[in-house]
Image (tube, grey):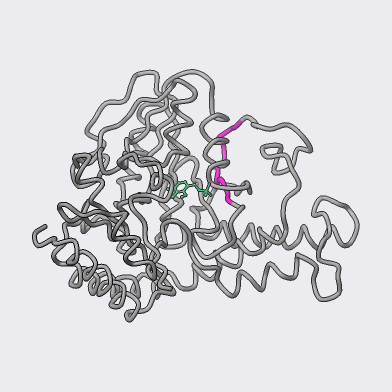
Amino acid sequence: MIYLDYQATTPLAPDARDAMLRWLDGPDGTGFGNPHSPHRMGRQAKAAIELARERVAALFPAGGQVIFTGSATEAINLAIRGSGKNGSVSVSAIEHAAVLDTAQALGQAHILNVAKDGQCNTNQDVPNDTRLIAVMQANNEIGVIQPTVEWHRKAKENNALFLCDAVQAYGKMLVTGADMIAVSAHKLHGPKGVGALWVRDGVSLEEQQTGGGQEHGLRSGTLSPALIAGFGAAAEVASERLEEDAAHVEMLWKRARELFSDWTLNGSAEARWHGNLNIRRTGLDVNRLMSDCRNVMFSAGSACASGSGRPSHVLKAIGLSDKQAKNSIRLGFGRYTTLEEIEQAAAEINAAAQDQGLTEQ
Ligand code: PLP
């Protein structure tokens, strides 16, 4: 099987796996302690969490704290719901459902437009009562990188906070200024079921679940030392390999672009994380393509949207018709993808597209 779905999730790094095993039971059976217990086993587990916190924090700007959560979705909910009750929440049209649906559920969403290249530019107004602006760093469907520094500045000018969903960027590029940043371990070769919210010093939030008061009272619930240790190890490896991973992805991107030169790229080629190739062919039957290429794991639109039958809201927001959106596929690759895998997958996908009688873009 060839795995080309890196925006959905990433393979677990060996270092992350090793770090986790110690806190599941450990060689001497003492790894299962509750990190909030005051005895020795508890203190050891707590120390592992604090080490992981430092490793995760190293990929964030200075001057903030890391709150561990069960996912990025939970981190985003804490940021949006916990940062205020009144006023508008201005969000880009291509945010993940975790942001869009939360702002909408509160009845506070103001949707920011996105240009044809996939960028959400700051040359548009936000409502006067905007209390929070949320623009992601790299999009999960088309990989387009957003001008988050400018949005942070605009938020300050409007006396609003700025939340950045950096799930797809964290561990791949430096995460730039924001008041709050949400991330998820499983997108950077860590385990599923653990995320974090980075909160700038001085930003105050209200807890969204009551209980034992863990994580500075912001996220009650017993932390998982194994998941968090895995997250920390994955973050440390990502810090060490930031440039090496980016160079590897660049090499794969260049070859993939050649191999899929008959396809049209969705979104900007330049302002983009190059581990994402979202492409379309006129008349492509994506379901048939997927069943013809069962050896290749890729996606139709985003993992969340695929299966729903609805055309992707991201592709629609950048001006694609329903048909064009449904003619699109997403290939995602990264650290563990080989050139041979890209070539093999391209051969299979292009042959299957040819079988559909597709000749033009
Ligand atoms: N934001 C983006 C951009 C994502 O890609 C995802 C996951 O697909 C999420 C948020 C949600 O992350 P989690 O799976 O940790 O809830």
Specify whether residue 239 is painted magenta.
Answer: no
Q: Position of residue 165 (x, y in %)?
A: 44, 45
Q: Is residue 49 left or right of residue 28?
A: left
The magenta-colored residue range is 195-205
Image quadrant containing the N terminus: bottom left
Q: Residue 242: which quarter of the image?
A: bottom left
Q: Is residue 198 magenta?
A: yes
- Please say if 5 is above or below 321: below
The foreground one among 360 and 143 is 360
Name the residue located 50 percent from the left edge and 41 percent from the top edge.
Answer: 180
Considering every residue shown, the one lying at the far bottom of the view is 340
Image quarter hosting the C terminus:
bottom left
Query: In this rendering, would 236 be left or right of 220?
Result: left
Toward the left, the furthest residue is: 360
Please provide percent x and percent y for residue 298.
Answer: 37, 61
**87 vs 316: above or below:** above
The location of residue 38, given as percent across then percent down, is: 88, 53
190 with respect to 108 (left or right): right
Q: Residue at x 55, y 29 (%)?
A: 81
Q: Give the number of callouts.
A: 0
* Residue nearer the viewer, 341 or 17: 341
Residue 339, image x, y percentages = 32, 79
Q: Residue at x 53, y 46 (%)?
A: 72
Q: Quadrant of residue 78?
A: top right
Q: Is residue 40 left or right of residue 168?
A: right
